[in-house]
């Protein structure tokens, strides 16, 4: 009985947190769709800074990881496929692995590690040092000025980084591993293009936008949940990372099941 | 001039349920300079937070510009706050914005018709008026208390508010610094005769700096009033 009670309490707590995430998403949608003119220069500035930090400054690390992942997958594929007589499947394998799955997931994991943590700790610090209240007394809605541009900026960034990751890992994989195996570049590209359909691109796009929405929302929520103590900030950051990872992987699984089963 | 702030039968209690003040009735009018004197943890911060709409009274009503703050929507409250400027005790500045951006932020956010350059020019002018001599494009984190107060004061005045509230403005400042900030506020009051200046302090030692028309004391949950001019 006690176990059931504990389980019930835990579920209720989770449901409450999910509802808080939902409120942030609705507030962001309202800001973007209906209140975009309110403080537009100030909020645009926050949005551009977020995209610069999350997408542009992540390009070097994304490039390295994409090249290495591309190298590993192309090397593995080229070592196994000839033995199975499936050399022609290289395109399909790259599309299945990189575009359907690894692109959005890796871009998200990197964004969580770099920007999700930064967002949660920055907002946490702003909350604990009364900066959020200072904005409120200036008549500036923190949800509109602080949260909405961060969530939108993270969505745009994960979207851009996903496609960048996919392009670099496929091309880089070929350059690093495929080049020495006498596969002509045109044959390699043809094989990719044939395997890539509308569904693959759309699902990748959908995943990247949803993952960005999740990371921005979860990180903002845990950041703003900090009260007065500075010691709450590292805890909020850890929760933001764990919460984002959990939701990104669950959403990934759900979308994959919905589209590819 | 007409009443701008009307506090009627307001009671406020702390977290332990102890009354900070009970059944308080006060009103402030345009053109006034009011000094609220109270010891630490006696409720003056709560009173100021109520004016800003950050706290609500446990009983009674607080009306600012005729609007009951408890019944306002978020948008209504934000509109009201545009007419008010606050300098809080800790002079909180936005840590990820440069000094000049901190001052210009309310202008950039609320006056969308104003160009970015004009907002920056106005912010620089106000900072110059406070006597700020630091780096306008530096981050405010490591600045001394006085510089932070100068920036917070410039930011509070940037929208030309009708109500200016300064919480413990003189704490931790030298006499010269106190005179500097106070004379800027007096100047603002002279050039905006309909404005209301509200100061809070722990004692009336610094009262001469702003020559208040009224002094309000909060002691042992009781509010008493003294007319000075």
Image: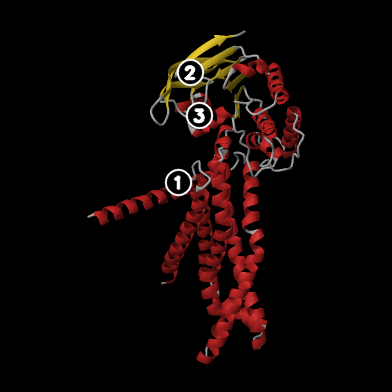
Tell me the number on the disc at residue A130. none
Left or right placement of residue B16 versus residue B207 in this view = left
| Disc 3 from disc 1: Cα separation | 22 Å
Tell me the number on the disc at residue B219. 2
The chain letter under disc 3 is B
User: Quick one: quadrant of the N terminus of chain B?
Assistant: top right
| Image vertical order of residue A99 relative to residue B142, above or below | below
| Image vertical order of residue B130 relative to residue A56, above or below | above
The reply to whether the C-beta atoms of the residues labelled 2 and 1 are less than 8 Å apart is no
| Image vertical order of residue A221 relative to residue B106, above or below | below
Q: Name the image quarter holding residue A169.
A: bottom right
Q: Name the residue under label 3.
A: B53
Give residue B140's position: percent from left, percent from top.
68, 40
Marks 3 and 2: which is nearer the front?
2
Marks 3 and 1: which is nearer the front?
3
Label 2 crowding class (10 Å Cα cut-off): few <14, some 14-19, many 20+? some
| Disc 2 from disc 1: Cα separation | 42 Å
Q: What element carries label 1?
A: helix
Residue A35 visible somewhere in the drawing: no
User: Quick one: quadrant of the C terminus of chain B?
Assistant: top right
């Amino acid at each position: 009985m006690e176990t059931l009670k504990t389980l019930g309490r835990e579920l209720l707590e989770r449901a409450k947190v999910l509802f808080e995430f939902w409120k942030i998403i609705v507030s962001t949608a309202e800001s973007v769709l209906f209140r975009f003119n309110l403080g537009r220069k100030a909020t645009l500035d926050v949005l551009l800074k977020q995209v610069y930090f999350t997408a542009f400054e992540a390009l070097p690390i994304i490039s390295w990881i994409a090249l290495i992942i591309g190298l590993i997958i192309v090397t593995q594929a080229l070592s196994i496929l000839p033995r199975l007589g499936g050399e022609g499947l290289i395109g399909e394998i790259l599309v299945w692995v990189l575009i359907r799955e690894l692109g959005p997931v890796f871009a998200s994991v990197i964004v969580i590690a770099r920007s999700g943590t930064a967002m949660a700790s920055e907002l946490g610090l702003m909350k604990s040092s009364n900066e959020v209240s200072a904005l409120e007394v200036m008549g500036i809605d923190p949800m509109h000025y602080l949260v909405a541009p961060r969530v939108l900026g993270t969505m745009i960034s994960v979207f851009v980084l996903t496609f960048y990751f996919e392009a670099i890992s496929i091309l880089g994989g070929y350059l690093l591993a495929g080049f020495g195996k006498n596969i002509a570049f045109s044959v390699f590209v043809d094989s990719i293009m044939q395997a890539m359909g509308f569904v693959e691109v759309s699902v990748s796009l959908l995943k990247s936008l949803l993952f960005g929405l999740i990371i921005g929302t979860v990180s903002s929520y845990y950041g703003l949940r900090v009260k007065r103590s500075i010691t709450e900030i590292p805890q909020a950051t850890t929760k933001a990372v764990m919460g984002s990872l959990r939701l990104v992987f669950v959403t990934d699984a759900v979308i994959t099941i919905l589209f590819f089963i | 001039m007409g009443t701008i702030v009307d506090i009627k039968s307001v009671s406020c209690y702390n977290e332990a349920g102890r009354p900070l003040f009970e059944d308080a009735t006060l009103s402030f009018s345009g053109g006034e300079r009011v000094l609220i004197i109270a010891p630490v943890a006696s409720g003056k911060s709560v009173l100021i937070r109520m004016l800003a709409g950050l706290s609500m009274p446990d009983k009674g009503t607080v009306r600012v510009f005729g609007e009951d703050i408890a019944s306002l929507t978020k948008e209504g409250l934000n509109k009201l706050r545009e007419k008010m400027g606050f300098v809080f005790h800790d002079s909180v500045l936005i840590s990820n914005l440069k000094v000049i951006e901190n001052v210009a932020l309310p202008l950039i956010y609320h006056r969308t018709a104003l160009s970015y350059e004009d907002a920056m020019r106005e912010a620089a002018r106000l900072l110059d008026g406070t006597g700020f001599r630091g780096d306008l494009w530096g981050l405010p984190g490591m600045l001394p208390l006085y510089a932070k107060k100068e920036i917070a004061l410039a930011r509070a005045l940037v929208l030309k508010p009708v109500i200016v509230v300064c919480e413990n403005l003189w704490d931790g400042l030298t006499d010269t610094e106190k005179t500097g900030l106070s004379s800027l506020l007096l100047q603002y009051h002279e050039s905006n005769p309909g404005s209301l200046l509200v100061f809070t302090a722990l004692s009336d030692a610094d009262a001469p700096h702003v020559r208040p028309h009224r002094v309000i004391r909060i002691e042992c949950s009781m509010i008493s009033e003294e007319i000075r001019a």
